[in-house]
Image: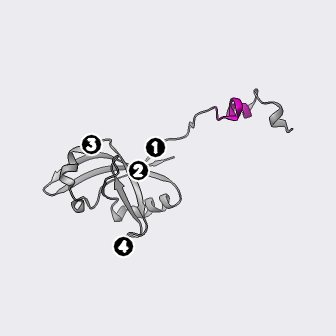
């Protein structure tokens, strides 16, 4: 038996592992870190975007999905709403660093800040976040 297991219940080990070896403390450093303001690219190519627009609201969380096999951009990051519907992409001019972070296992996501229908084009402004 080592020193750490002898003193269970009254030291740091018990604090970290709780009773029965289960984690006893929340993850205090887990947070969302704001990285960048941008917009959703390619919304004019999304079929039915006009019908989808009223269901996209400020503060809605958007999933980022890497598409490394995308024939137009090897750094492509698709953007999907809460229902899993693709609404466009992170703009190619902005995606290189974000794609590398995602490829390294980091979780990135977006939040809608504004939306505006301009003819057949839906402009969706977003903030990009890193979940740390």
Which element carries disc 2, helix, strand or loop?
Answer: strand
Query: Is tag 3's residue or tag 2's residue first in the polypeptide sequence?
Result: 3
Residue that badge 2 annotates: 109
Tell which tag, 1 or 4, sits nearer the viewer: 4
Residue that badge 3 annotates: 57
Q: Position of residue 38 (x, y in %)?
A: 32, 54
Instruction: Assess whether residue 41 is covered by the magenta stretch.
Output: no
Residue that badge 1 annotates: 32
Judge by depth and name the residue closer to the eye, 52 or 27: 52
Query: Is tag 2's residue or tag 1's residue first in the polypeptide sequence?
Result: 1
Distance in Å between CA atoms under marks 3 and 2? 15 Å
Using the image, determine if residue 42 lies above or below residue 24.
below
Please report the bounds of the magenta region as a residue range. 13-24
Colouring used for the render? one colour
Q: Position of residue 121 (x, y in %)?
A: 18, 57
Residue at x-position 27% and y-position 42% = 57
Which element carries disc 3, helix, strand or loop?
Answer: loop
Tell which tag, 3 or 1, sits nearer the viewer: 3
Judge by depth and name the residue closer to the eye, 82 or 7: 82
Give the farthest residue toward the top.
Answer: 10
Q: Is residue 29 left or right of residue 49?
A: right
Judge by depth and name the residue closer to the eye, 36 or 126: 126
Q: Are marks 3 and 1 in contact (CB under 8 Å)?
A: no
């Amino acid at each position: 038996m080592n020193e750490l297991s002898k003193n269970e219940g009254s030291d740091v080990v018990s604090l970290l592992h709780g009773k029965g070896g289960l984690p006893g403390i929340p993850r205090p450093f887990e947070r969302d870190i704001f990285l960048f303001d941008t917009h959703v690219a390619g919304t004019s190519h999304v079929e039915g975007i006009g019908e989808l627009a009223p269901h996209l609201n400020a503060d809605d969380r958007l999933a980022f999905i890497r598409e490394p096999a995308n024939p137009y951009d090897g750094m492509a990051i698709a953007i999907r709403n809460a229902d899993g519907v693709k609404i466009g992409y992170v703009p190619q001019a902005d995606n290189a660093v974000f794609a590398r972070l995602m490829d390294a296992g980091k979780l990135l996501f977006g939040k809608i800040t504004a939306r505006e229908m301009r003819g057949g084009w839906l402009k969706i402004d977003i903030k990009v976040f890193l979940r740390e």
